[in-house]
Image: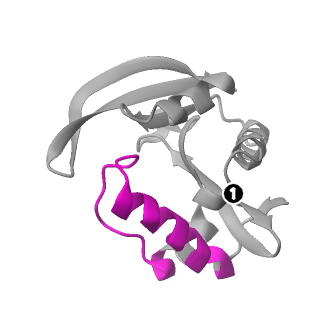
Amino acid sequence: MIRPARMGDADAIAAIWNHVIRDTAQTFTTAEKDPGALAVQITDQPCFVAERGGRVVGFVIYGQFRSGPGYAHTMEHSIHVAQDARAAGLGRALMGMAEDHARGAGIHSMIAGVAGENAGGAAFHAALGYAEIARLPQVGWKFGRWHDLVVMQKML
């Protein structure tokens, strides 16, 4: 089931996100998410969760790509699905919900920032109609090495 996130989902979202932060280069940050701050973020930004068996197993959240009124119609999202819930269509369902919500809010385009070594993430977004629009070499530093960022975009 895909549904809007609630403040009470913050612990589960943090657990999924923090695994990605600690153990992968899918995101370049090393600062783990605080559930209290996430609870506030969930109320400030559109966020949807995938729930299976009463457990939150994935989420998507989006917000303005860059600050300022000129960017008000371009959003950037983060999506993560728990390792044990992948390949079940939940990521596609989450993105569908987020994109439908964004369209309804008058959003023109959605941006995905995908780590250069995350071929699965790039393929996932490409299958949803995202196109690679830029590759930023060596902009992320994590695990003692540089990482490229692939910027992908979909017109909604």
- In the figure, residue 81 lies in which quadrant? bottom right
In this view, the residue in front, 19 or 93, is: 19
Quadrant where the C terminus is found in the figure: top right
Image spot of residue 142 (x, y percent): 22, 50
Image spot of residue 46 (x, y percent): 66, 56
In this view, the residue in front, 155 or 12, is: 12
Our reading of the magenta stretch's main secondary structure is helix
Image spot of residue 139 (x, y percent): 22, 35
What SS does tag 1 mark?
Answer: helix
Q: Residue visible at 30% across and 66% down? A: 31
The mark tally for this picture is: 1
According to the image, label 1 marks what residue? 85
Q: Residue visible at 49% across and 82% down? A: 36
Q: Residue visible at 69% across and 57% down? A: 85
**Residue 44, placed above or below residue 110:** below
Instruction: Decide: few, some or many residues near mark 1? Use Cα within 10 Å; few <14, some 14-19, many ≥20.
Output: some
* Residue 61 falls inside the magenta stretch: no
Residue 82: in sight, yes or no? no
Q: Is residue 130 left or right of residue 33?
A: right
Q: Is residue 78 left or right of residue 151?
A: right
Span colored in magenta: 8-37
Residue 64: in sight, yes or no? yes
**Residue 71, placed above or below residue 35:** above
**Residue 55, placed above or below residue 8:** above
**Residue flagged by tag 1: what amino acid is it?**
Ala
Q: Residue visible at 45% across and 65% down? A: 19
* Residue 25 falls inside the magenta stretch: yes
- In the figure, residue 30 lies in which quadrant? bottom left
